[in-house]
Every structure is written in C-alpha cells, then in structure tokens.
Amino acid sequence: MNKLSIRLGLLFFIFILLIETMLFFFLYQGIISERIQSETGNLLARGTTHRNVLEKNFQESTIEHVALMETEAATDVVITDENNKVIKSSNEITDGMQELINNSKAHHFTHHGELLEDRWKTEKYMATVSPIVVNKKVVGFVFMFLETVPIRNMIHQLTNQFILVGVISIFITLITIFLLSKFIVSPLLEMKRVTEQISQGNHENELNTKRDDELGDLARSIQLLSDNLERLKKDRNEFLSSISHDLKTPLTYLKGYADIAKRPNLTNEQRNEYLAIIKEEAENVVALINDLFELAKMDENQFTIHRRSVMLNDFLEKISQKFQPAFNEANIILQIKCAANIRVSIDAERFRQVISNLLDNALKYSPANTTVTVEVNQNKNGTTITVSDEGEGISEKDLPNIWDRLYRVEKSRSRSTGGSGLGLAIVKKIIEGHGGEISVRSKVNVGTTFTIHLKDGGAN
C-alpha cells in the first residue's frame, strides 16, 4: 500500500466503481420500471379495446369472439356481468383469477379502466378491469390477466445480464486503471531513479523531456536541476582547487622565507628584505580571505546596501587621489570626466570597492604611456559610469568568464599582480545589490571598457 501506483490505482478504482455502480443502478431500475409500465399499459389497452367492442354489440357472439381472440395470447380475458358473474373466459379461470374478480366487487371503477393488481414480485397475476357501459349503465366487466412468472423470468435474465456486464466492466476498469497507473507512475519512477543517481553524483542519466504535459514539465525541471548541480559541482571543485593553489603558494613563500630569515649568517638588510616579502605574502593571504568572507556574506544575503545621496564628482576625485601615485609611477594617465552637479544614491563604502577594483585592474593590465578614463553620464534613464583603459584587453573567449570567482585571464600573472580573482565577482554582486547592471566590452591590444548603469540616477 506504500507504492504510489497501488494507491493511485485503488483511488481510481473506488471512484470509477462508485460511478459505475450508480449508473448501473439507475439504468437497471429505469429498464425494469419501463418494462413493467409497458406490460401494464399493454394489458390495460387490450382490456379497453375488448370493452369498446363489447359496448357496441354486447351479445353472446361478440363475447365468444373476444374470448376466442385471447386463447392464443399470453394474456387471459374474463368477461362478467354487472355482478361479476363470469359469462365467458379465454381459458380456464384459476383460483388466483377468481380471487381477484371477487375482491373487485366492492370497488367502483371508472370507464377508462383501472389496474387491479400490479405486484409482480409477489403475486401470480397482474390484472386490469374495464367496465362495459351500455346506455349509461354498467352491464359487465372485462378482466385482463397476465401471469407474472414470465415477467420475473425476464427481470431475472436482465439482472444476470447486468451482473455479467458489471463484472466485465470491472475487469476492463481494472485493466484500464492498471495501464493508466503505469502510464502515470512509470515516468515518476524513472524520475525517482534518476534523482537517486543524481544524489550519488551520477549526472549522465537523461529524462524524457519531450512530453507536453505536467510530467514533461517535471522532467525538464529535474533535468535542469541535474545540469545545474553538475555545473555547481564542477565550479565548486574548480573553486576549491583555485583556493588551495592561491593559499598554498603564499603559505609556501611564508614558510620558505621564514626559514631563510632564521639563518644566523644573514645581514640585517637581507633579513629585512625577507621579512618584507613575508609581510607582503601575509597581506595577500589576508586580502584573499577577506574577499572570500565578503563573497560568502553576499551569497547568503547577509550584506545590505545603505544608500545615501553622494556628489559623484567629489566621490570619484577622492578615489583618484588615492590611486594617483601608483598611476604616476606606472606612467599612466588617470582622467575623471564627471559633471560637478551629478548626484547619485549609493552605498559609498560598497561603491568605493567597485571603482577601486576596476581602477586597480586597469592599472595592472595597462602599459606605460596610456590613459585610463572614468566617465559619467546622467539622463532620465539613470546614471552610466564607464571605466576605460588602453591595455592588453580580454579575448572574446575569456569575456563570459571574467565574472566567475577565481578566474584569471592570464594565469601566469596571478602571483605577480597579486590579484585574488574574486574582485570582479564582488563588483558584480555590489552593482546588482544597487539594482544596477554592469557589462564589459574589450578588444585584445586595444583596451577594455566596463560600463555600470544605475537606474536611480538621482537629481542634477
């Protein structure tokens, strides 16, 4: 009973059995009622016909003729006088017939004729009576009798037929329900098997996603879930591998230079040089861990955006002053193009991370004697901020992946540039947290442009 197919099939069977039972009951009762009414109606009609003939000529010859007509019929006719004394009958009068005739003496019957006995289940005869009226005076009665045994036999035969049809219907219903249950449950069982395989890390199984019903929608959802889980598993493994590499390298440097710094024959100048390297690598590890914590908070929606109105030109000038010495040392020009009256609603601390990260990337990947430009435009649709450089650029195949965590366009420069590969992932999260969008276009050996669009640009 724990199997879905059994419970579903049993539920279908109960409902269909109830419906079939009600339909068979009403149909059975309707047929029986119609047959009984037909028999009694025909019996009364034959009695009325005979009565009409006798009213036109109530003579012995006519009475003989009426009786003779019923001798070969399934019905019997008995003609009496006004006192219910038998004048003529088509066949021998039985005790049951006589009893019904005698019991009718105390009754007054209408000229249309009446049903004298209709209890076909218990009585031997069904009977009708039609008064014979001549010159407005009752001169006799026409009694019609029909044995109930043939009716009961007919009803019994009809009952057997209904039972047979009912058994066949139940058998067909069971087969239909079995096939229907299999048709519905089989895809579910297949989905169960595939999900079990997915839970064990096997994503090679594929479901039938071509169905155009709810099961097809479910199959497509499970297939999509499987694909996403496989991709997440791959991303997780790559992420852990990259993290292990990025932590192992500086930690190896830390251990190696610490061992060297412990040597007693080093000069103070050499020891200070090694300690500076140890400090730099330790700062790289701290920066990487901080970035990881930052992303973890963003993934769990534990970071919030606290907006306030900011004069964007002043905001960008303060950031450029911080970067200016590094740009001067690299012989790169840093330009800020922003109208003095542009105001935006942003989280200043978070947005500082965005601009700083983009400027830091531009500085690392731009050669000397080039220009890095930060340009701001504002209109009724919002505020657009572009950060452009004239550096190495990013190849077309790498562009879709730059937002991935720990992805570096040029793997060989990972350590020399000091980047964690998490900066652009954090930038994207912060921009999306502001309800904005960020995009990039780039061409190798021409340069790269990052474009930030904020829908809430504020007022001029």
Image (spheres, grey):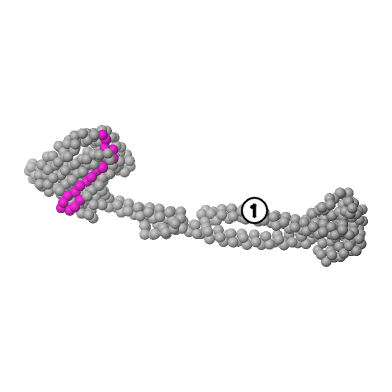
174 relative to 263 in the view: left or right? right
Task: Give me the residue at 64% from left, 59% from top.
Answer: 166
Task: Give me the residue at 61% from left, 59% from top.
Answer: 170
Residue 27, how many percent across, how many down? 67, 56
Residue 452, how many percent across, how many down? 24, 43
Residue 404, how many percent across, how many down? 26, 49
Q: Is residue 441 visible?
A: yes
- The part of the image, by quadrant, that contains residue 64 is bottom right
Task: Give me the residue at 32% from left, 53% from top.
Answer: 231
Q: Is residue 407 visible?
A: no
Q: Is residue 66 above or below residue 131?
A: below
**Residue numbers of the magenta segment:** 442-459
116 relative to 224 in the view: left or right? right
Task: Give me the residue at 30% from left, 54% from top.
Answer: 234
Q: Is residue 250 above or below residue 202?
A: above
Q: Residues within 10 Å of mark 1 (few under 14, many from 20)?
A: few
Residue 164, how many percent across, how many down? 66, 62
- The part of the image, by quadrant, that contains residue 343 is top left
- The part of the image, by quadrant, that contains residue 277 is top left
Residue type (three-letter) at the residue carrying disc 1? Met
Pick the residue in front: 408 or 45: 45
Q: Specify whether residue 44 is painted magenta.
A: no
Q: Which residue is mark 1?
A: 22
Q: Specify whether residue 448 is painted magenta.
A: yes
Residue at the outermost bottom position = 72
